Image: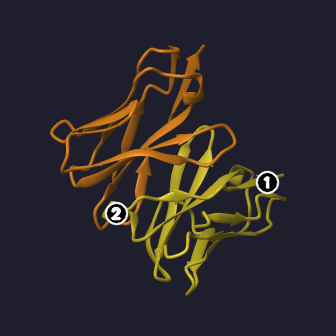
Amino acid sequence: KAGVTQTPRYLIKTRGQQVTLSCSPISGHRSVSWYQQTPGQGLQFLFEYFSETQRNKGNFPGRFSGRQFSNSRSEMNVSTLELGDSALYLCASSLAPSGGGETQYFGPGTRLLVL
Amino acid sequence: GENVEQHPSTLSVQEGDSAVIKCTYSDSASNYFPWYKQELGKRPQLIIDIRSNVGEKKDQRIAVTLNKTAKHFSLHITETQPEDSAVYFCAASIHGNNDMRFGAGTRLTVKP
């Protein structure tokens, strides 16, 4: 099976712009979670989608949003970018929501740099 | 919500020695505890996991132990090798809560 894929892999934006990142889960996986990874903060949970519904959301401002499509592909959007949004954004897929003890498989990440 | 603390933040061992990384969690309802290894520039990869109905699980040189009473779990790597050098993350999730909380990571360096 193909693994989790994310596009784009690298992105450079300027403050105030918005960005959309995409994640394609492993075939058959219906749950997609998003994480922000920074050197000082580790892996921070953003949100999780299952069957096109956001099931949970971490402690991030409303500028961070996401959605999931009927084919389980997910996108996350960050509006009004700030310098502090520079990070590696990882998505992970699992068969069912992670709270059920399902193994999550990570994508390669999108490295976002905000100038 | 769940809070996961991980120690130490950095760990350096000599090749062949053992390495132990410990995590504590706050919510006694947590029932799934995976460990991920992330090599430089790569994605986190699951290396072992444990569910709350068992106390220990082994996979070759890697083992994880869980103490539900004390709410902590540990990763044990024996006979470490230079290729074990990476950042290791623990995580915990609660059934039905639909999110995974990660520890801050431990940078393990195995010196040849």
Q: Name the residue under label 2.
A: A99
Q: Can residue B9 be seen in this view?
A: yes
Q: x%, y% of residue A35?
A: 56, 57
The shade of chain A is yellow
Residue type for callout 2:
Gly
Q: Mark 1 points at which residue?
A: A114
Residue type for callout 1:
Val
The shade of chain B is orange
Q: Is residue A77 above or below residue B32?
A: below
Report which quarter residue A63 is drawn in: bottom right
Task: Please tell me which residue is depicted at 36% across the width and 47% down the height of the picture.
Answer: B49
- Asked whether, in this view, residue B2 is left or right of residue A61, the answer is left
Q: What crowding class fits label 1: few (fewer than 14 Cα within 10 Å), some (14-19), or many (20 or more)?
A: some
Q: Is residue B74 above or below residue B93?
A: above
Task: Please tell me which residue is depicted at 20% across the width and 46% down the height of the picture.
Answer: B54
Residues marked 2 and 1 touching at CB (< 8 Å): no
Colour convention of the picture: by chain
Report which quarter residue A20 is drawn in: bottom right
What number is the disc on residue A100? none
Q: Which chain carries label 1?
A: A
Q: In this view, does A78 lie above or below B6?
A: below
Q: x%, y% of residue A101?
A: 33, 60
Of A39 and A95, the residue lying toward us: A95
Of B28 and B33, the residue lying toward us: B33
